[in-house]
Image (cartoon, rainbow, N blue to C red):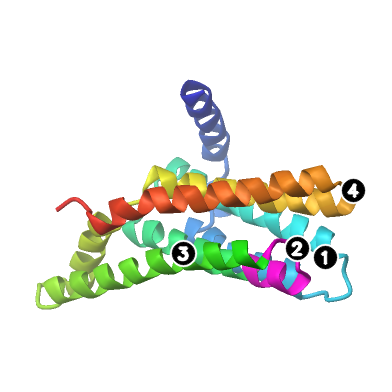
């Protein structure tokens, strides 16, 4: 499976490398667009079918989450700032999803609280390392650059964290399809994927608590 994924990424990278230079945008713009596209899909049209809104938001999230990294790698535009921006946008977008799900009563409130609590733990740990990294680098010759480098080491992207995002994307997409098709079994499957997302969040917490030096 890992080899298949690598071959797929290599194939996409070759396609993206064929994009003319004057058409290539900063991948960070794709990352930031995720936040606005998700919000727009979920809340811009209150009269829209909520299941269609959820599906559109999940599709926008998934596509932009893949292509910002793919474009950064293919166009050699990967930066530490971009790596740190990505999880911030992911978490903010996830909050938009949770707010929408709460407003529409789509998943059990207890599950929403568990997801929020697990994400809050990650946010608190991240804020701590942001503070510690800034204190350690604020008097260096290049405080901001040194801060980003140290912070990147303190809060590295953990595989469980990326898998968590995949689980939530699948969950929201399945929940949307369940609503569109009025399929209770699909809804249950969607909730199961949300639970898996919480589990992978919990698995990533120890890595954030004990980052490499």
10 Å crowding of disc 2: few (<14), some (14-19), many (20+): some
Percent of width and height locating residue 164 = 51, 49
What's the magenta region? Answer: 97-108
Helix, strand or loop for disc 2: loop
Percent of width and height locating residue 38 = 66, 65
Marks 2 and 4, how far apart in space? 14 Å
Question: Which residue is rendered at x = 33% and y = 67% of the image?
Answer: 126
Residue receiving disc 2: 106
Q: Is residue 176 left or right of residue 76?
A: right
Mark drawn on residue 181? 4
Residue 154 appears in the picture as rendered: yes
> Disc 2 or 4, which lies upstream in sequence?
2
In depth, the one of 201 and 72 nearer the eye is 201
Helix, strand or loop for disc 1: helix
Residue receiving disc 1: 50
Residue receiving disc 3: 119
Q: In this rendering, is residue 194 above or below 124?
A: above
- Give the main secondary structure of the magenta stretch: helix
Asked whether the residues under the numbered discs 3 and 4 touch, taking CB atoms below 8 Å apart as contact, a structural biologist would say: no
Asked whether the residues under the numbered discs 2 and 1 touch, taking CB atoms below 8 Å apart as contact, a structural biologist would say: yes
> Disc 2 or 3, which lies upstream in sequence?
2
Helix, strand or loop for disc 4: helix
């Amino acid at each position: 499976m890992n080899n298949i994924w690598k071959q797929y990424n290599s194939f996409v990278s070759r396609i993206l490398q064929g994009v003319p230079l004057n058409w290539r945008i900063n991948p960070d713009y794709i990352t930031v667009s995720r936040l606005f596209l998700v919000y727009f899909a979920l809340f811009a049209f209150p009269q829209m079918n909520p299941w269609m809104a959820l599906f559109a938001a999940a599709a926008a999230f998934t596509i932009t989450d893949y292509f910002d990294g793919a474009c950064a790698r293919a166009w050699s535009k990967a930066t530490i700032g971009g790596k740190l921006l990505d999880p911030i946008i992911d978490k903010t977008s996830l909050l938009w999803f949770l707010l929408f799900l709460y407003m529409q009563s789509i998943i059990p409130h207890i599950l929403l609280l568990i997801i929020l609590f697990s994400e809050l733990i990650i946010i608190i740990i991240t804020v701590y390392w942001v503070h510690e990294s800034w204190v350690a680098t604020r008097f260096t010759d290049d405080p901001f650059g040194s801060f980003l480098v140290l912070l990147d080491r303190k809060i590295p992207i953990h595989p469980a964290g990326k898998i968590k995002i995949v689980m939530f994307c699948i969950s929201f997409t399945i929940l949307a399809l369940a609503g569109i098709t009025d399929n209770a079994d699909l809804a249950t499957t969607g909730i199961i994927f949300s639970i898996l997302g919480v589990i992978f969040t919990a698995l990533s917490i120890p890595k954030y608590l004990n980052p490499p030096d």
